[in-house]
Image (cartoon, grey):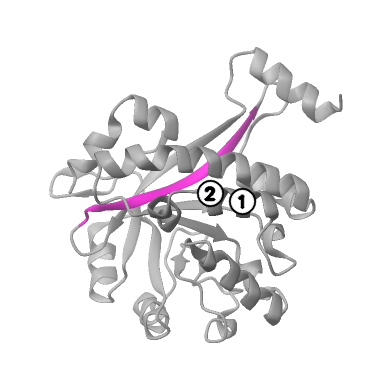
Amino acid sequence: MDKLNISVTRTIDSGVRPIELKCTPIYDCLFSNVAGLRSRALVNSVDYGTLDPGDYMPALEDDRESASSFTARNLRVVLGALPALQSQARGISLFLLSCPVSLVRRGTLAAEVTRLLRAADPKCAEAVCLSFAPELLRLPPKDLQSALLHIRSLGCKVAVEGFGRADFPMSVLPLAAPDLLLLERDRKGDFPAGMAAYVQFAEALGIQTLAVGVPAETVLRGLNDAQCAYYTPAPGLRTEGRSLYMEKELTDLLSERSVASLAGFN
């Protein structure tokens, strides 16, 4: 047994969940109704503490087999939860799951993930949106176009993160457009100057935009005016007297009936 398996076994024996899928609501910009959930996987270890995607994603980018197993594990949990999510909160039609780009480096989605999506209820597969770092758009053009076609043939959507940042490969978008772009703030906490122009550029290509971590109602109004489709709130964002930010582990979200409270936002 290698060191990783020993660490996982020790973590399980300690009662700690090895992987937690933390979920934040996605709202539509027009009415602030819940439209879906964005997840981030945290890896817990009694040896290394809690690792967020910034800690472990580089390793998965170098190991397609591990990337496939990790993503398949998380996808299996999501597909198992979606029927309850969709029945308890009718507006949930989008579930973002972050994935390493190594899953599609050969122009096709890894086999283990492909099998899960092919076997899934079509309504659940349609809600899944696989979210990748901007490096997805730096794949060889034929591999990128092939990967997008393959993922869409399985019924799910593709998102690309980092939209609006200085090093984002904008020129690729007209040639191979994802379904969703995640408009993100810089290290200072600001959205890019000319935020509306970014949203409208994506809209002209038929790509929807999701603004990540909206901090204030004034920003939300600007996004709405620009016809941004979705947003996730920053902690502390309130509209009409209600707090919109929440982050819960997916299984807790279901067991605590927090989905019902999400439905109440609609």
- Read off the magenta span: 32-44
Element under disc 2: helix
Q: In the image, what residue occupies the spot 72% across and 25% down?
A: 8
Q: Quadrant of residue 148?
A: bottom right
Q: In the image, what residue occupies the spot 53% across and 49% down?
A: 119
The majority secondary structure of the magenta stretch comes to strand
Q: CA distance from mark 2 to mark 1?
A: 6 Å
Q: Is residue 131 depicted above or below 3 in this figure? A: below
Q: Residue furthest right?
A: 1
Q: Left or right: where does residue 74 sit relative to residue 56?
A: left
Q: Position of residue 166 (x, y in %)?
A: 57, 74
Q: Left or right: where does residue 192 sit relative to residue 265?
A: right
Q: Amino acid type of disc 2?
A: Ala
Q: Quadrant of residue 263?
A: top left
Q: Amino acid type of disc 1?
A: Arg
Mark 2 vs 1: CB contact within 8 A:
yes
Disc 2 target residue: 119
Q: Is residue 161 visible?
A: no
Disc 1 target residue: 115
